[in-house]
Structures are given as C-alpha cells and as structure tokens.
Image: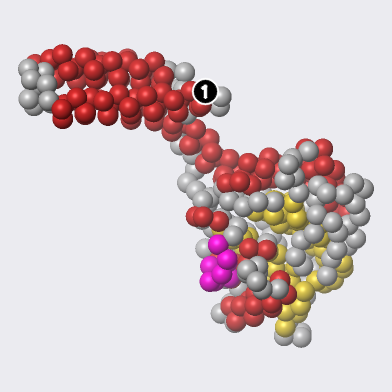
Amino acid sequence: MPHRGTTSSRGLPLRVRRHVDDRGLIVPLVLANVLILAMIAFWPDVWPVSLFVFPLMLANSFLAPRAIPWFALLTALFALASLLFESELSLRLVIRSIVIVLIALLIWRVSLRRTRLGVGGAKAEAMFVDLLERIQRPSNISLPAGWYLDTAIRAAGNTPFNGDFVVSTQGRETLQLVVVDVSGKGTQAGTRALQLSGALAGLLDALPASRFLAAANDYLLRQDWDEGFATAIHLCINLENGAYEVRSAGHLPAIQLKSGQGRWTAIPAEGPALGLVEDADYPATHGVVRPKDSMVLYTDGLVERPGEHIDVGIDRLLGQAERALAGGADDLAERLIDAPGSSDDRTLVLLHRL
C-alpha cells in the first residue's frame, strides 16, 4: 500500500525467476520418447500414442529454439513408428497419430520463428516479463516527508504491454515526472514504448528540464517510425517550496487541485507532439503546489469517449477526482483508473502534498 514520502506502482508482475539450462533436458526428453515407444510396443492396449504430447510440451517450454525443430520432427517419427506395434490398426489410432504429428509440425514451425530471437518458451516469457517490469517500475525515488506519489497503469485488451509509460528522476530538491502516450494502443504500441522508455529515461537524467522534450522530439524524428509520434507531459517540481514547471508535447493538460479554492483546474501547456516537427519549442507553464494541493497527470484513455468532445471527458475526470479525494489520497490513482470508461490504454499519476 502506498504511504507518505514514498512511491507506489500497482499490478507489477512477479520478479523473473532463473530457469534451468536447457542443455540438461535434451537427453531426458529423448529418453522419454524412447520409453513411451517401448511402452506402446509392449503394452499397446494400455498406453496411448497421445503420451508423446508431454515431451513435446516440455520441449516447447524449456528447450532452446535451435533444439526444438529436430526434437519435434523426431517425436513425429516416434508417433508414426508406434503404429508398427499395433496388432490391429483402426481409424481412431491413425487419427491420434496424425494429430501428434500435426502438433509436432506446429511446434517445429513456431520454433523456426523463435530462432530470430534466440530464446523461446519459458525463457522468452521471462525476458518479456523482465522488460515489462522495467518499463513499469518506478525509478529509485524517495520523496521527503510531506509528499505522496501514486501511479496506476492499465492496458487495452487486458494485456500488460501497452503504449503508455512513466519515466521519472529525482534530484537533491527536484522531482521530474513524464507521462508518455505512444501512438497506437496495446501490443501494437508496446514494442515502441519499450524502446522509447529507456531512451527517455536516459535523456531525463542527462539533460536540464528545459531541454528534455526538445531532445525527445529529436530522438523520435531520427527513428523514422511509420507511426513514430508520441504525446508527453513533463512535470518538474521543487520539493522544497512546491514550485513547478509543466511542459506539454501534444498531450492533454495536467490538472491541479488548489485546496485554497476547493476545485480542480486544468494547467494549460502547449507544444507539438514528439516526432512530428523539427526544432519544436516547448514553453513552460509555472505554478505552485501548496500544502493539501494535488497534481494529476494522465493519458487520453481516461477521458476520450466515441462521439464525445474531449473537454467533456476532462470535466468528468475532474468530477471523479474531486469525489474520490474526499475519501483521502491513498489509492486515489487506482480508484480513478478503475472507474468505468474507455478500454484504451490509460495511465494516471497522482502527486499530493500533505
């Protein structure tokens, strides 16, 4: 649960566990095929040919792609050879053997595609989980007493890979938060988001806040992607006095709760989306987050609805935020992002000053 002076990010996957080296599995799997064939040869009425599915599934999960093709073909040959030991061939037995052969050929075909990556099965899944954890894991941020930060990310189609991500960095007195929405959604934008998140995190650490979006824009222009644009909003805030700068690259405005006024207000900031215009300018909007104030950064998945003007969606989010904050700041990001609405990728970051 999030607490004061720290950060939180929910729904992160479990840490990747190390897997057994597949070189020690090849011989046992081949011996398993030999054993199954021997069992069918001696007791054909007891052991079915479908037993060959088990070594196939184990090989598909744990062997390296270079070893799977020949093992799949070997298993298909074993399945066909098992017919030689049947005292009476039936249509059912032949169909079962053909099904095993088709499964083996399907695994063989998939393994050939995996050879481009060099890993497959459980190891490939572990690698993607690690990449996902890296894109969603907050930077090493330790906020001083009196500040609260919460982040929530949801992907379209219930897939963890999406085009929204958050990068952040913390200095001696300042905190920088960037919410990015890559063009596309779900897995279509996931690969670009993975690449872009690492690059923007490096730029954020290396450059002054005033130059960050311009450098990010130059980076995207150099990539020459077919759908190579992204929107972003960049918040740089002084944790000593609450003074902030907000810069936008074609993104929806940040919103701030001004406790003295008792209402949420949008913070105007203008600039073109990243990756569209050369030598773009990103002017800053200045303000102050005072005690009891909150700042929310979000992506368009939270406010866009078909046939509805975007301002209506922003007003709805403001109303939801005002009602949710009445129950306290804890878990506010989760409560807002899970509100009924769009199935698009959506991200929300809440910064609250106690």
Q: Is residue 63 above or below residue 252?
A: above
| Count of numbered marks | 1
Q: Is residue 14 magenta?
A: no
Q: Is residue 174 visible?
A: no
User: What stretch of residues is rendered in magenta?
Assistant: 336-343
Q: Nearer the viewer, residue 98 or 327?
A: 98
Q: Is residue 339 magenta?
A: yes
Image quadrant in which you'd find residue 196: top right
Query: Left or right of 44: which side holds 203?
Result: right
Q: Position of residue 56 (x, y in %)?
A: 32, 26
Image quadrant in which you'd find residue 249: bottom right
Q: Position of residue 46 (x, y in %)?
A: 8, 26
For the C terminus, the quadrant is: bottom right
Q: Could you classify mark 1 by the number of other residues whose Cα lies within 10 Å: few (under 14), some (14-19), or many (20 or more)?
A: some
Q: Position of residue 312 (x, y in %)?
A: 69, 77
Q: Is residue 224 visible?
A: yes
Q: Is residue 221 above or below residue 144?
A: above
Name the residue rendered at 82%, 63% in the picture: 246
Residue extending furthest bottom? Answer: 261
Q: Nearer the viewer, residue 144 or 215?
A: 215
Q: Position of residue 210 (x, y in %)?
A: 88, 54
Q: Nearer the viewer, residue 152 or 113?
A: 113
> Label 1: which residue?
115
Name the residue rendered at 80%, 68% in the picture: 242
- What is the magenta segment's predominant secondary structure? loop
Q: How is the model colour-coded? A: secondary structure
Element at badge 1?
loop
Name the residue rendered at 63%, 63% in the picture: 301
Task: Name the amino acid type tagged 1.
Answer: Thr
